Amino acid sequence: MTTRPALPPLYVRNPEYVGDAPFKDDLFNRSALAETLTGYIDRTKDGCVMGIDAPWGEGKSWFGRNWRAKLNAEGYKTIYLDAFERDYTDDPFTILTAEILDAVSEGASRPVEKRFLTASLKLGKALLPAAAKITINAIGKTFLGAQDITGDVAEMVKKLDEEAADVAEKYIAARLAESEAEKKSVVGFRTALTDFAAAQAKPVVFFIDELDRCRPDFAVRVVERVKHFFDVPNLVFVLLLNRDQLRRAIEGVYGHGFDADAYLGKFIHLFLALPKSTSIDSDKSNATSVYASHVAKRYRFENSVALDNFVYAFGQLSAAFDMSLRDVEKAFTLLALAGVSESAAHLAWPIVVKLKYPDVFRGLLAGDRASHQKAIDLLQKIDPGDNNCSIRDYFLAIHTQRVKGREELPETLKQALTNFAPRITFHGDVLRFLMKRIDIALMD
């Protein structure tokens, strides 16, 4: 019986966010950033809302969870909320409050904890009419007497209602009573939360992740709730987000043309970008190249010159086109699909196009001349400097030949076609052959 050779997996799940210790396998020295930010936290005794900004797939969650673990080890109370997992709710107030209660109740005295819980219940009840009053009480009852409103609000409505002459006045009376109750509840809640946070020896750090993936209305409401109700001394919020995406969410809620940046500036005190070097150099200064080598090991590819050549070529191209770390992981799924052969380095450009410019990829498969021109334009933007970028030259020759014909190629590109051609036995359309290797729908 023939034994099949062991093949690398097609998909390797990300390892746990936090390894044996915080910032284990820290490829990009982000522990240094965490150390700096911890120093900021110690200087924000009056509370702070901090935004850590990076595009999707750049390791915000990894950074946040490892920083949290580091803070825990140093004696800070921390809270971590994946907002995307909870955006099915209408109002995030109860979620934020419950997370705080769950995380720090052991460190607070029982009376302080009880006062905070009581204040939370009162404010939560006062906030209900804005979102759920019509659902809880029938519309007619809301207008005609508010029989189902409970607690202090109902008592105030009853007193005011005795003097009301008609339905409109009764409605206004109810709204006035609710407004007064809400104001008192907000003051009481912030006072209780202030006492609650002050009971902690160090600032409480509340991480909110995946905010930019939430429903726009929920994402905006989280930011607003944090500012209006939770902005108290000794409580620091760290929002892990894509600022551009959150900006679009705000515009989606308040309308196109709304100044989302000015709006965010009112709610978030400090924005910091999660750094990533994207030099075309294939060394430790190139984040995507470093990460590519790391992911290759996770996929358990057999060490070979062909694999090294792919990592080198892909590292250059992915840096030039500012691909995310998540894109790097997807690239190795495609490489595992294609298999590592002597032509592995030549798969780097088709993989970059498929992941970053899918419309161009489809156009190239269809033989669209305009897509070949777009590919030329993309490749011409790469400035290799003093670095050897033979893959760029080879594919620039391939695409230029399709647009202008071989006779019109400059001598340097003719040489690139000969000198850097993949070592494969194949007659016909080399580009299509390479593209088919990374697209399962096209495999023979």
Image (tube, rainbow, N blue to C red):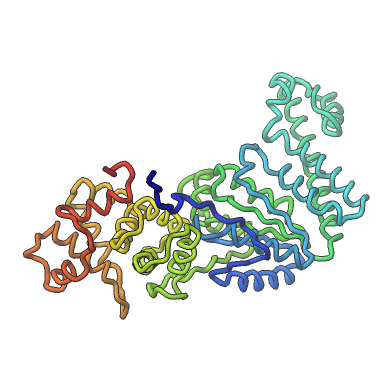
Q: Residue at x 46, y 75 (%)?
A: 285
Q: Which residue is drawn at 43% across and 52% down?
A: 6
Question: Along the line of sight, which residue is nearer the eye, 144 or 201?
Answer: 201
Q: Quadrant location of the N terminus? A: top left
Residue 105 in percent (x, y) is at 84, 51
Q: In the image, is residue 26 above or below residue 365?
A: below
**Is residue 360 shown to the viewer in this render?**
no
**Is residue 92 shown to the viewer in this render?**
yes
Q: In the image, is residue 88 above or below residue 114?
A: above
Residue 194 in percent (x, y) is at 82, 56
Task: Left or right? Give the position of 412 relative to 358.
Answer: left
Question: Along the line of sight, which residue is nearer the eye, 5 or 443?
Answer: 5
Q: Residue at x 52, y 56 (%)?
A: 242
Quarter assignment of residue 387: bottom left
Q: Which residue is drawn at 72% across and 65% down?
A: 71
Task: Left or right? Give the position of 407 relative to 89.
Answer: left
Task: Left or right? Give the position of 342 relative to 398.
Answer: right
Task: Left or right? Give the position of 280 relative to 150.
Answer: left
Residue 258 in percent (x, y) is at 50, 50
Residue reaching furthest to the left: 407
Residue 24 in percent (x, y) is at 62, 67
